[in-house]
Amino acid sequence: EVQLVESGGGSVQAGGSLRISCSISGIGDRSFFLAWFRQKDGKEREVVGGLYTHGRTLYSDSVKGHWTVSRDPEKNILYLQMSDLQPEDTAMYYCAAKGPGSGGSWHDWTTFGYWGQGTQVTVST
């Protein structure tokens, strides 16, 4: 069974940085797409970025060049390094995974079958 557990959220001042983590179990050596989504109050869940376990990394236009998605395959941890955080980045951040043969766009949260419980990131002025 695939399980995802996020950690590392918290409060940070505008302009600051934060790294959140997602501990992943159950994917073995299979090719998965692992992603970070966020959901702001009253808004739909949106993708931040993600990576194929055997391939490339993708980012949404809003964070490309500023934030980094990475993975430690030995520890089975997915990271999201966030820099220059702003109040509009305040959201619940979720780790998600979809497995081999899963269809749909990597942007589309409805195509992901596995989710963590989320970790809150709050950015204050």
Image (cartoon, rainbow, N blue to C red):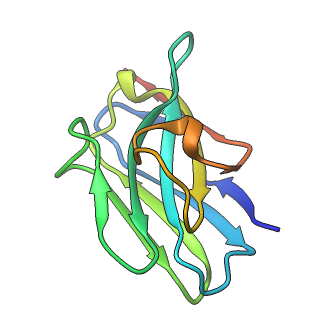
Give the residue at x 67% y 42%: 118
Give the residue at x 46% y 75%: 53
For residue 80, what is the image quadrant? bottom left
Figure check: 97 above or below 45:
below
Q: Position of residue 103 (x, y in %)?
A: 50, 51
Figure check: 21 above or below 41:
below
Q: Is residue 76 visible?
A: yes
Give the residue at x 38% y 22%: 87
Q: Position of residue 8 (x, y in %)?
A: 60, 53
Quadrant of image for the C terminus: top left
Q: Position of residue 88 (x, y in %)?
A: 37, 21
Quadrant of image for the N terminus: bottom right
For residue 21, what is the image quadrant? bottom right
Camera-side residue of 57 and 120: 57
Camera-side residue of 40 and 30: 30
Q: Would residue 6 be found to the left or right of residue 33 on screen?
A: right
